[in-house]
Amino acid sequence: MKIIFYSYSGVHSAVVAGAAYLGLWSAQEAASLQFSGIPFFGCQESKSELRYLGNDKQGNQVYTLGVKGEMELVPRAIQDFLQLMEIPAQDLIMINTNLFINRMSRWGERLARYGLIKTGNFLARQGLKKDFPLLFKEVKKMLKRQGVLT
């Protein structure tokens, strides 16, 4: 199975959620704003690309993706492609991390995306520090509903 965490930029809330899910990052690191250990965090070279973060304990592959303003279109297009290729839809879980972040995080993602990288990354870090508990709680809930977590 493949799990894709997606957000506006794909290099902020999506990588934080993916890294936390994989156990690469903790709530303590979020509280202290230690984002340097998160793969791809704030990385502008790979925006809008599907990025592999690693495998979870069950062997599921975990990715992140930036979708810009196409929060509904991109997942729908991917699901349609799977159907067209006769790949079972249950082999893919897509989680929109933008649903669980505040305005500061959203603005940070957008500003970084449009070239104000330092300001955007700063705002995203500040926002994600506050967002992390809800973000991780909701991600775990969604993965439990899908049968990935028990």
Image (cartoon, rainbow, N blue to C red):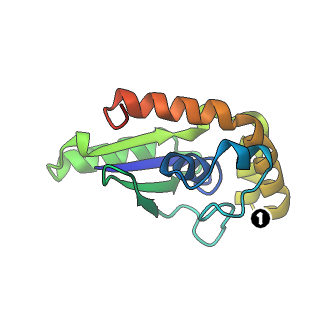
Classify 53 as above or below 86.
below
* Count of numbered badges drawn on the protein: 1
Q: In the rendered image, which quarter contains the C terminus?
A: top left
Residue 8 shows in this picture: no
59 left or right of 56? left
Q: Residue at x 77, y 43 (%)?
A: 31
Secondary structure at badge 1 equals loop
Classify 13 as above or below 136.
below
Which residue occupies the foreground of this view, 35 or 9?
A: 35
**Mark 1 residue crowding within 10 angstroms, few (<14) / some (14–19) / many (20+):** few
Which residue occupies the foreground of this view, 37 or 81?
A: 37
69 left or right of 78? right
Residue 69 x, y percent position in the rendering: 59, 45
Residue 79 x, y percent position in the rendering: 30, 43
The amino acid beneath tag 1 is Gly
Q: Residue at x 65, y 60 (%)?
A: 41
What is the residue that sits farthest to the bottom in this orientation? 45
Residue 120 x, y percent position in the rendering: 79, 55
Q: Residue at x 78, y 56 (%)?
A: 121
Residue 103 x, y percent position in the rendering: 76, 35
Residue holding disc 1: 115
Which residue occupies the foreground of this view, 117 or 71?
A: 117
124 left or right of 82? right
Which residue occupies the foreground of this view, 113 or 105?
A: 105
45 left or right of 85? right
Residue 23 shows in this picture: yes
